[in-house]
Amino acid sequence: MSAAHSVLHAVFGYAQFRGPQQAIVSHVIGGGDALVLMPTGGGKSLCYQVPAIVRQQAGHGVAVVVSPLIALMHDQVGALHEAGVSAAYLNSTLSYEETQEVEWRLQGGDITLLYAAPERLNTPRFLGLLDDLHAQGKLSLFAIDEAHCVSQWGHDFRPEYRALTLLHERYAGVPRIALTATADALTRADIVERLQLEEARHFISSFDRPNIRYKIAEKKDVSNQLLRFIEREHEGEAGVVYCQSRKRVEELAQTLSQAGIAALPYHAGLPAEMRQQHQDRFLREDGIVMVATIAFGMGINKPDVRFVAHVDMPKNIEGYYQETGRAGRDGLPADAWMAYGLSDVVNQRRMIDESPAEEEFKQVMRGKLDALLSLAEATDCRRVRLLSYFGEQYGQPPDEDGRPLQSAARSTCGNCDNCLAPPALWDGTDAARKLLSTIYRVHEMSQLTFGAGHIMDVLRGKDTDKVRQYGHEKLSTFGIGKEYSEPQLRAVMRQLLATGALGLHKITSENSGYSFDTLSLAEGSRAVLRGEVEVQLREAVAASRSKSSKRAAKPNVAAASLGPDAQVRFINLKAWRAEVAREHNLPAYVIFHDATLAAIAERNPATLADLQGINGMGAKKLEAYGAEVLRVVGG
């Protein structure tokens, strides 16, 4: 491990490993296979980069990194070059001549880490290169990033990952490390089986991201809700806003832009050139808000994303966790904000039901959606529930092998909306029983199922054409819920869907072919109807406030604790870093993170020796930029 610590300090500029990194690095350097679950921002890359460098120095050759995204490859290779590490990638952006050059360098032993997409790894040409290297004993390790992509239960399944089983079969003895930030027990088991990692050691870090504040709101006027959130909490800061549809992406990006927020759209329907341009601006400029579908985000390494917002409910907790985890990668305070409503649940259920998948798969996906809905409807600590989904008790993080440490579990985190401002609750048990009774009576009379709108009309005693058409005004439950508002009843429906008391079914009209969703009683309804289960709901929050309540502009989060003179040095360092980044055609954070600039500004170095020991200031960067940093600080 002395060699590993030397690489960590000299190449990457860090004094020590974090959490389970040291145990993982030691295990892989020794030739062991590993499955690593570590949250976004936890330092997964170092877990294979350090072993790759150490094993290459020991004569084991090149490490091959399987990565799903071109953007991630470019960033990682650019960052390694800045740190003085020989790295390259093979992907579709290279010309034939450039590809040949990389292959020659690979055969000549001139590359320490090679990044490739799973599609390329499975080609005969690439396998031929690997076969030659393996025969010479020059394959040091395989790193499989975003390993959840191999699992059908994962939130981002990619069939081409399934072929990676050949690594074990074809290159026996070459250590493999599979890494992901998001995997429940079912997905983990699938990763192990698909990649033949039965003998691998498992390293499971805590899933907790204590710097992220979780906030979930009932959807009312979501565009204005989002606008108020950004203006009050994150004006001028970088963020990502996720939407379900391309249309919503473009509309919302326009709304934010018209409000003076630097917002850009991103979805698969935009021209490739425009998508790349928008992604480059997001990575290279300060304060850009990217409004996107989930086509954007995996592998985005931007450390200073201060918020991730969802204006539509994701498919499952894994997707939600993965996407919110893109905020605050630098460890500084960040927000995860989501607005959701009954229509989100209906739309997600419809997508599951209409998919061509097997019924077993659909059942698993419904269960995952229900778990996310339960998180959204929760009136207790969000973080406790989120970690519980991944098998972790809050306050009892696992050791490096995934076993809970013997510490007291906690029931509150103090950094989610429910903990910071416990919601006022109202007892929705009576409303729930009346709602379920109405659904039962309506079905009993008509032998048909109906949608949420019609059920609420009957319950609230509304005289509509549809009510009269089916004679539902004669039901004993007609009008017995007059005291409840439509938003209250929709909240009750969401809760009943989340707890399994209500089911959703898609009905297609034989005449028009129009499809709509209807409600029916499910197994959990009996306990509610008998009064055995209480339904506690949060009070609806009043909708709008004026823009005048938005807070005053704040300094950069990384530099917030700096004094006035250090703030000036930090600003000057950021301006210099931006120039260097433009010259190198790299995102600014690849040169130095904000936290490194803040540490330099606070130390106010006068000599190169003063720069040593600052996190992120490795030997190559000290040599390349040290004199310029001193000039900027001294000026």
Image (cartoon, helix red, strand yellow):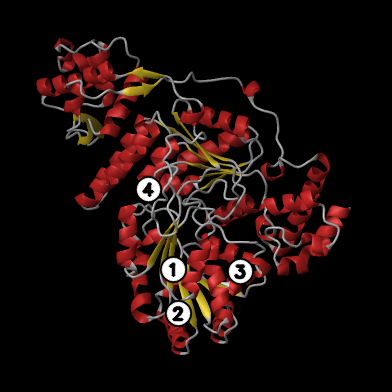
Instruction: Tell which of 289 and 397 is nearer to you.
Output: 397
Classify mark 2: helix, strand or loop: helix
Q: Nearer the viewer, mark 1 or mark 2?
A: 1
Task: Mark 4 and mark 1 in contact? Answer it, CB < 8 Å.
Answer: no
Instruction: Tell which of 595 and 217 is nearer to you.
Output: 595
Classify mark 3: helix, strand or loop: helix
Q: Nearer the viewer, mark 3 or mark 4?
A: 3
Q: Which residue is drawn at the image coordinates 32% and 20% (left, top)?
A: 489
Image location (x, y in percent) of residue 290: 56, 45
Q: Nearer the viewer, mark 4 or mark 2?
A: 4
**Residue annotated with mark 2:** 126
Q: Using the rendered image of the protein, determine whether residue 153 is visible from the camera's viewpoint.
A: no
Which of marks 2 and 4 precedes in the sequence? 2
Classify mark 4: helix, strand or loop: loop
Q: Gap between marks 3 and 4, in whole Å? A: 31 Å
Q: Amino acid at mark 4?
A: Phe
Q: Amino acid at mark 2?
A: Phe
